[in-house]
Image: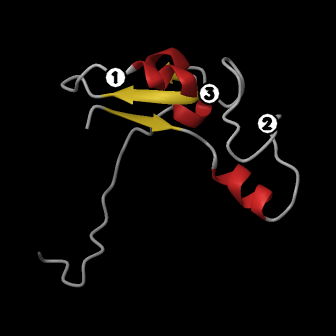
Amino acid sequence: MDAVLLVRHQHQVVEGLAGRPLIDERGHLLDYGLPGSFPPHALVTNPSGRQLPGEFLALHAVPLQALNAAAEYNPGEIVMWANTADNPTD
């Protein structure tokens, strides 16, 4: 995996399919906003990955390091993984 793009878009899909108005000044379900619009689209790159193609620029991706002020993308201090398998000893 070369990168992950974090986009807050689920709300738009739910509201649009329910026939309710969209938020964040979006015109339709596939409207990903304008460059610099809120909420930003965070691009998390893999340091060992390949360079991304230019098509990512069309999604207005912003490197995660540039979004330090955006609370949506500030990681927590601890990540806890829960075993959801039937047999927790595996």
**Mark 3 crowd level (few <14, some 14–19, many ≥20, 10 Å Cα):** many
**Foreground disc of the pair 2, 1:** 1
**Sequence order check: which comes first, mark 2 or mark 1?**
2
Residue position marked by numbered label 3 in the rendering: 40
Residue position marked by numbered label 1 in the rendering: 52
Count of marks placed on residues: 3
Q: What's the residue type where badge 1 is placed?
A: Leu
Could you tell me which residue is drawn at 67 percent across and 31 percent down?
39
Residue position marked by numbered label 2 in the rendering: 24
Q: What's the residue type where badge 2 is placed?
A: Asp
Question: Which element carries disc 3, helix, strand or loop?
Answer: loop
Mark 2 vs mark 3, CA separation in Å: 11 Å
Q: What's the residue type where badge 3 is placed?
A: Pro
Question: Would residue 43 be found to the left or right of residue 20 on screen?
Answer: left
Are circles 3 and 1 on residues that touch, CB within 8 Å? Answer: no
Could you tell me which residue is drawn at 83 percent across and 34 percent down?
25
**Sequence order check: which comes first, mark 3 or mark 1?**
3
Q: Using the rendered image of the protein, determine whether residue 64 is visible from the camera's viewpoint.
A: no
| 31 or 78, nearer to the observer | 31
